[in-house]
Image: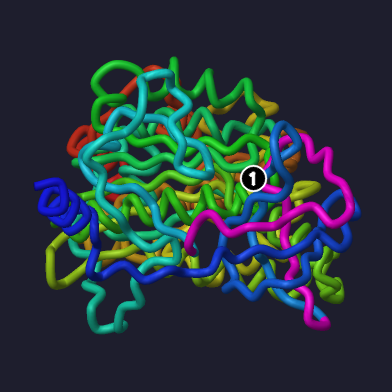
Amino acid sequence: MLNLFTEDYLEGLRCGDFAPRPRISGRLSSYDGLLMEAVGLQLPVGTVCAIGDGESRVEAEVIGFRSGKTLLMNLGGPAALLPNAPVRPIGAPGEAEVGAAMLGRVVDGSGKPIDGLGPIRGAGKWPLAGKLQSPLDRGRVLQPLDVGVRAINGLLTIGQGQRVGIMAGSGVGKSVLLGMMVRAAQADMIVIGLIGERSREVADFLETKVAGAARARSVVVAVPANHSPVLRIRGALRATAIAEAFRAEGKKVLLIMDSLTRVAHAGREIGLALGEPASARGYPPSAIAMLPSLIERAGTDVHTGGSITAIYTVLADGDDGNDPVVDSARSILDGHIVLSRALAERGVYPAIDLGPSVSRVMTDIAPREHVAAARVLRRHLATYEENRDLVLMGAYRAGADPEIDAAIACHPAVMEYIRQGSDEIVTLPDAVTELVGVFGHG
């Protein structure tokens, strides 16, 4: 009887498909405060590893190889490591948690919730690097998107599936303009990536810009400036992956990323640590080459009908419009909104400089009379700005030029159209009606 029990019991414990696997482990050979080198293991780029044991354990990501050694970068936190500390893989190359379970949640660059609402359950998976699509899988931009800002709705109309950059120096109002667009945007879901910004701005953005009903349909990925450069890049990839998964479900998604420049800065830190030569303004080639692969993931999917309308803030270092990141983003995006420090100093908010700003799809999505009225307003503003000094000095004599006379007469109406309070929402139909009514007859 005992033998039968023993045989049955042992048979129940036996696992027929069990196959023992070795535990992969290496050793830390060098660490200079930023870059780690490990020997004794071969892992694909993107693998997350645990280094050390106990309280001194930290996480790092594989970023490359050199002379038979694996290069890693710390994912954050103090690294009280000793020579020859064990290095063990703990995660496969990147996947992001996606789906409806993410709505209303705030996560960090690693996908861990930081909002105090507990773990995220029932989320799906999506590759951090996205799924490569054929150019023919991308649809045209044919429908306008209401963003609640009069100057943008009327003069720089944004379409569903468009990629737009907000370009300006520091302190000109990029984040305030983003908040206005988030509150009013007519989208099914909003995915917000706060990458490399101040920690204070994260809490402020959540409490003022994404409060109430907007919070329930939003996903926020927050990676402040004091986090590892690897985590900052992962945060940008994670926000884009979450938006891609919603688009695959046929949703109209608004992707906000503040800021694209901080992503490039993180790429610069990693590239220089790997020994890449610095080229344009200290940026290695890989930092600039990373931007197209990130931006091109937004757009319209012809198969599902879903779309990602992406709005990126681009910080112009030193107010330089020819900064490598600004120049590269401008060449890839479907439009750019330039904010002027001179307008901000005159108290014009949002400080949109209409001259260099453009929406490359506006003529495809706006009626003919709308486009014509926008061109009239632009012409009057350009004429006034060209002759502004003459007018202010009193050197211009009224009646000398009908174009200048018309620009001077229309200038108060132009500035009133551009100005808008940060808590005011102007719908697309209202913005177009006002524009055509005032400037629709030349």
What's the image's color scheme? rainbow
Name the residue type under label 1. Answer: Ala
Q: Is residue 417 above or below residue 242?
A: above
Residue at (24, 62) in percent of width and height: 15
In-front residue for pair 50/419: 50
Q: Quadrant of residue 248?
A: bottom left
Residue 240 quadrant: bottom left
Q: Nearer the viewer, residue 174 or 21?
A: 21
| Residue 342 in the figure: left or right of residue 177 | right
In the picture provided, is 288 more to the left or to the right than 280? left
Left or right: 164, with 235 as reference point: left
Residue 187 visible in the displayed image: no
Indicate the position of residue 210 as horizontal and vertical percent values: 37, 24
The structure residue drawn at horizontal position 19% and vertical position 64%, both measured from the top left corner, is 142
In magenta segment, residue 128: no
List the residue tagged with mark 1: 168
**90 or 135, which lies in front?**
90
Identify the image quadrant of residue 307.
Answer: bottom left
Where's residue 283, x and y in %?
78, 66
Residue 76 within the segment the image draws in magenta? yes
Give the residue displayed 61% in from the left and 48% down from the top.
232
Circle 1: element type: strand
Q: Which residues are magenta?
A: 67-92
Q: Residue at coordinates 43% horizontally, 31% vertically from top-left?
A: 113
| Residue placed most toward the observer, 45 or 315 | 45
Using the image, determine if residue 119 lies above or below residue 336: above
**Residue 268: horizontal and vertical position, in percent?**
75, 61
Q: Position of residue 246 (x, y in %)?
A: 23, 52
